[in-house]
Amino acid sequence: MLTEPKVEHRTEQAYAAIRTKVSMKDIPTVLPPLFPEMFAWLAKNNIAPDGPPFIHYLSMDKDDQLQVAVGIPIQNAVTGDGRVVGGAFPAGTYASVIHTGNYSHLREAHMTLDSWLDANGWKDKRQATHHGMQYGPRTEFYPNDPKVETNPDKWESEITILLAEE
């Protein structure tokens, strides 16, 4: 189930994340173990989360390998330590939709949001490079913990996309 897409301005949001490369088929096995590692890193460094964990899609190369950041929003910028890096979602206009249901259907939710953007004249912030496609902030936020909410039909995911400035 999807909510009606919306467009809104968001302020800059700092985060801490682990960046990695992954194939689309390996996302369900490779990325979820990084969330506990991120929460442990925040706890060790006495940093409180300032929003739900996320997967931020940075780019896709010509071999269909995704460069992603698995992280958690925080209040203030951090440097990180090599494994964990600091970053920020830039201020700007974002389109978003909330998907309720199993994460295995998120691809369809992304495609629905992309179609809605096209139908309404919006463009996401991306560019083709000689290495592949470089994305603007396209992110999945996960507000509920699957260990707490064990029914996959009730899992929520907010998909956000930074829009290109006109």
Image: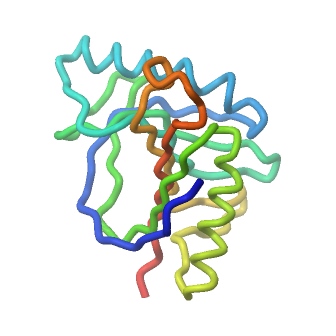
Q: Residue furthest right?
A: 63
Q: Please tell me which residue lies in front, 32 or 81.
A: 32
At x 52% / y 56%, what residue is drawn?
A: 138
Q: Looking at the image, can residue 137 be seen?
A: no
Q: Quadrant of residue 37?
A: top left
Give how far across and how far down residue 5 sits, in percent: 49, 69
How many numbered circles does the render carry?
0
x, y percent for residue 82: 41, 24
Residue 2 sits in which quadrant?
bottom right
At 27% from the left and 45% from the top, the residue drawn is 14
Above or below residue 14? Residue 161 is below
Q: Is residue 128 something one can see in this rendering?
A: yes
Q: Nearer the viewer, residue 102 or 7?
A: 102
Q: Quadrant of the C terminus?
A: bottom left
Say left or right for 119 vs 39.
Answer: right
Q: Residue at x 45, y 38 (%)?
A: 142
Q: Is residue 88 above or below residue 103?
A: below
Q: Residue 3, position in %: x, y?
A: 50, 61
Point out residue 61 in the picture as x, y percentages from the top left corner.
73, 50
Q: Residue visible at 52% across and 37% down?
A: 154
Tell me the quarter of the picture where residue 95 sits: bottom left
Coloring scheme used: rainbow
Horizontal side of residue 92 vs 45, given as left or right:
right
